[in-house]
Image (cartoon, rainbow, N blue to C red):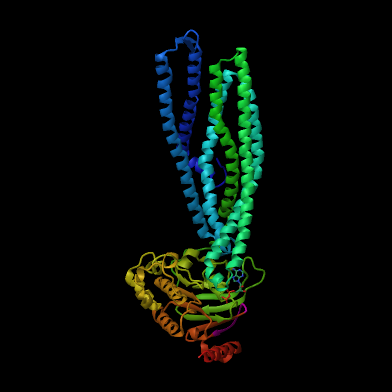
Amino acid sequence: MIFGKYVNKYYLKHIFALLLGVIALVSVDYFQLKIPEFYNYVVTGLGSKNGMITIGGQEVPFDLNFLLDKICAPMILTILVMALGRFLWRICMFGTAIKVETDLRERMFDHCKDLSQQYYQVNKVGNMMSLFTNDLSTINECFGDGTLMLVDALALTGLAIYKMSKLDPMLTLLAFIPMFLLFAVGTFVGKYMTKKWEERQEKFSQLSDFSQENFSGIAVIKAFVKEFKELWAFKKLNKENEKVNIEFTRISTLLHISVTFFVNSVICVILGYGGYLVYKGDFQVGQLIEFYGYFTSIVWPVMALSMLIDMTSRGKASLKRISELLDAKPDVVDGSSVENVEYIKGDIEFRNLDFAYPDGDYNVLENINFKICAGENVGIIGKTGSGKTTIVDLILRVYNVPNGSLFIDGKDVNTIPIKTLRDFCAYVPQDNFLFSDTIENNIAFSRDASSSDEVVKAAKLADVHENISEFPEKYATILGERGVTVSGGQKQRISIARALMKEASILILDDSVSAVDTKTEKVIIDNLRENRRGRTTILIAHRISTVEKMDKIIFVDDGKIKDVGTHNELVERCSDYKLMVELQKLEEEKGA
Ligand code: ADP
């Protein structure tokens, strides 16, 4: 059993299934404790000198009828009830645990989608994956097996102690002294195990982070012949993982050995002291066997108790990690000033914007001022690291924007619901990402419903239709890990097609034509101009040729706006821009 902020509600939600499981389990325990009574009857009956046996204060003959009516028939009934009960509690308890795991997983996934990009920069994918696999399955174990163990330990032990003390209270007390010691040892060791389990999970996360990064960056590793370096780094992490696992296993084994030791001590007490009582004539052999039968039936619950301590320790550590994820507040959310916005036309205005990243200690953007009118084609150009991506990230509200510094259609961006704003934007990120799915589904991803003709139209505008038509499966070609690998330029153009499908008021392309040749780039830009007439298009680029025909060029340098104007205007009045033009011309001539 496990308790905590994010699991308590499930006990209430599944109360009926859990209650049914508990009733079934307690019934099984009750019937299970009937069996030692039957042993007693048989042994006492066989040892009876006059062929009579006392049951419930009445003397009855120990004959074939007695064996059939009082032992075989009730025993068959007991076995049947136990089989049915066991089936029922398994379904109820383990089934509920699976439901809890599924529900919690869904909740975690739902929460993850609201977390900001910043969160994912701090928390690696491997770590997140281990929350969704290892930690969730530990919660499942604690909820299902844990509830079973706790109920079983309480019910079976309680019933058995009652029956044992009815037979001989002194023997019962002596038998339970080692059991109390076991409980004390288990509780103490459990605390240490929680700590070790946390370390174990941490190391596992590091290992999966490392593996995940290596698989993603395998091309870079191979190109730089760094396989051995990575292998050594992996070995080191793997060794640390092994060390902490061995430590955990050592302590867990110690606990299990202690259980066996204490259980055997009790058997010693029962046989020694119980045998003495039989010798003295205070106890019958049949009663000693019945007593021993009760004790053997509680060995498992007591073992379970120690396993429960171990499991709860692990469960607490896993729940702590999951709670940290669920407690993480989405930091980019709608503020109290949001209004209902039906439509976004595409006017964008920055007014004296200063911006520092949440974990940064300096302004990445300073005093940003420019205006884009709806329907304009705008290029943003500047050196790497000058702040171009940050500007478009703020338009998309990837980060929080200071009040009164960014206006969309004349409204402060903080008064526009984030979902509405993004609904009216289409975006091609720098590190464009395609899903392991068909090309058609990748392009159609940006729209809830679309026809194949619309997908083809978008692909034609992005100048990738011909490439797709050359694939044997055409638009049904599966991309990524399960399918074909497309070139960088094809990937960029499929991403552009996906963004174009949306027909959004604002289209942002972040360095999205860098991997295509200048001829293809020209075709795409001409198509964009033609197709997006009346809608805002922002294109971040490195090459002047990409943006020179745009209505407006925003020249960014070191987080500041150097100048805004047409290509000719900038060449005339901005010396840095002019220098950049000349340098790029020189480079082209050199290349040619
Ligand atoms: P550009 O798109 O012009 O290459 P960016 O907008 O990506 O430039 O980056 C501008 C500056 O902000 C750079 O100095 C970069 O290191 C920094 N930066 C970018 N992203 C982050 C981030 N998530 N956290 C902190 N600093 C960042």
Magenta residues, as a range? 558-564
Quadrant of the rendered image containing residue 298: top right
Find residue 486 and report its horizontal and vertical position in percent.
43, 73
- 48 and 206: which is toward the camera: 48
Q: Quadrant of the N terminus?
A: top right
Quadrant of the rendered image containing residue 237: bottom right
In the picture shown, does residue 449 fall above or below 326? below
Q: Is residue 228 left or right of residue 458?
A: right
Quadrant of the rendered image containing residue 207: bottom right
Find residue 208 and report its horizontal and vertical position in percent.
56, 58
- Give the residue displayed 47% in from the left and 26% down from the top: 31
Q: Is residue 474 left or right of residue 164?
A: left
- 118 and 257: which is toward the camera: 257
- Give the residue displayed 66% in from the left and 35% down from the top: 184
- 363 and 354: which is toward the camera: 363
Magenta residues: mostly which secondary structure?
strand
Find residue 106 and report its horizontal and vertical position in percent.
48, 52
Magenta run includes residue 226: no
